[in-house]
Amino acid sequence: MEKLGTSPCDQSTGNFDALFAKSKQTPKETAEEKRASAWGRDGFHGEYVPSTHVVLTTHPRRGCPIKVKWGAPSPEERGPVIASITQPKLKNAIGTHNGSYCVYRSIAVAAGKMDPMFRPDLHNTAPPVDITPSPSWFDPNKMVSMDPWGHMITSAFGSHLEKGVDVRPTIGVTKAHIQMPESREAIEKGRLVPDGKILLPDGSCVVTKAAIEHVWHLPGVAKRFNITEATLRRCMFEQTGGMFPELITRSDIDVFLPPIGGQTVYIFGPPEYCHDESKVCTVRVHDECNGSDVFGSDICTCRPYLVHGIEECIKTAQNGGVGVIVYFRKEGRSLGEVTKFLVYNARKRQEGGDRAETYFHRTACVAGVEDMRFQELMPDALHWLGITKIDHLISMSDMKYNAITESGIKVLERVAIPDDLIPSDAHVEIDAKMYAGYFVPEDKKEQVEANFKSTVGRQLDE
């Protein structure tokens, strides 16, 4: 029996060392070559010379030799998602890997920095922990926006890899220490106590994290939004400027890798506890906000609420449960940061100032819609982890709560952001959202309408 390596997941997932033991190995680099290939010094591979004519689209008569049967009872029957451009005749998905970063790959190829037929060396990339199948993986309706087998391709689709099929991961799982100054502050104030396992004395927190690329099953996505698949395909084709003609010409292909930002899951405590309803589970689903999350902008509650969620996840894990943060790349409610900044200006320059009662209206005036996050797809990551019950949902969003519970996950408690964590200029946001349907704690229900009418933020030049 071939040795599979040292990863804790090797026996269950295998690795590329075993699968490609007989494949041709890359010659050992010299010291000079290693220095030349260091960061920022990629070698020039030569001018890009296309080997074929431009193919604008393909048609069903080409067919897909390897089919995808979404939600099948086994990975063998489900089949691998093949979206690499190195084997166009085997592709069974529209789009390609790496989300929005595939554009940068095209520049690397055009600039002669990357071989267009490059295939990654995935030796020793297997997950260091097991995230194993749950019943949701075999239900075609539970997960429609990600491939649950995306981190297990060596075990799930090893036979295809051995035949030379270019199957690539769409999920990467690793372990990490995360450091946030607020955690050190919480230790100093006694809210958190280091245990040396989950929370270290320097304030670092030990987590498992998973990066997930979107893999959409188009019939399932359409069903989530109560629209026809034909409508979904046409609108995506038209509203992306015709980027993906196969959305129209390949009705026989059900899988699409959209060029959008993905999501990252942070797990505090043993990942296998997500399956176990006897364990307390704390969850925050967070949508990206660069201004607040990274730079601490005071106009919203994003970073403070994220930090509170992390703190509660740490406490839960220390008490024998599991905490989960799901971080989505949905900047500015998926409207984008440019639109968000334009809305900030419009809010603060309007007659009467930045008021809670016009909060959503000003967004719609600039963007044409109040919110494009559409949480219908959000619960998929929770189902991937096998979560069926959330004891503490660190979110006030009615849209997130409704999406989670309607997907079949029980929520026992909704946790509001503490008052002392709300930045002064963020009361406009939080008061508008509570009036619009966000979760409101009992002790604040009588104040909601009055705050909605009276809250005004600072001026633009203050």
Image (cartoon, rainbow, N blue to C red):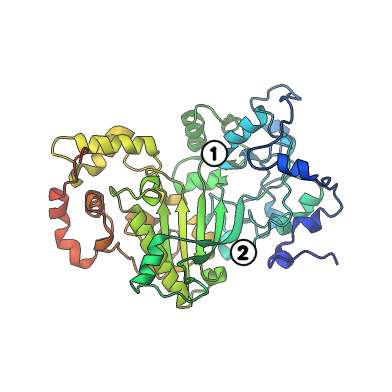
Q: Which residue is mark 1?
A: 100
Which residue lies at the image location 43% right of the left edge and 73% below the top edge?
A: 316
Q: CA distance from mark 2 to mark 1?
A: 28 Å
- Could you say which quadrant of the image residue 363 lies in? top left
Which amino acid type corresponds to the residue marked 2 in the rendered image?
Pro
Q: Position of residue 118 (x, y in %)?
A: 73, 39
Q: Is residue 289 above or below residue 461?
A: below
* Rendered location of residue 15, percent (x, y): 74, 58
Q: Which residue is mark 2?
A: 133
Left or right: 443 in relation to 405: left
**Residue 412 makes an appearance in the image:** no
Neighbourhood count class around disc 2 (C-alpha, 10 Å): few under 14, some 14–19, many 20 upward: some
Considering only vertical position in the picture, is 82 above or below 339? below
Q: Judging from the image, what secondary structure is the residue with disc 2 in?
A: loop
On screen, residue 108 versus residue 182, left or right, reads right
| Contact? badges 2 and 1 (CB < 8 Å) | no
- Mark positioned earlier in the residue sequence (2 or 1): 1
Residue 38 at x, y percent in the picture: 68, 43
Along the line of sight, which residue is nearer the eye, 437 or 20?
20
Q: Is residue 371 left or right of residue 12?
A: left
Asked if residue 350 can be seen in this view, the reply is yes
Label 1 neighbour load within 10 Å: few <14, some 14-19, many 20+: some
Q: Amino acid at mark 1?
A: Ser
**Residue beneath the point at 64% across and 25% down:** 56
SS label for mark 1: helix
Q: Residue at x 37, y 43 (%)?
A: 332
In depth, the one of 51 and 387 nearer the eye is 51
Q: Quadrant of the C terminus?
A: top left
Q: Residue furthest top?
A: 53
- Residue drawn at the location 48% of the way across and 28% of the way down: 238
Q: Is residue 2 above or below residue 295?
A: below
Q: Quadrant of the N terminus?
A: bottom right
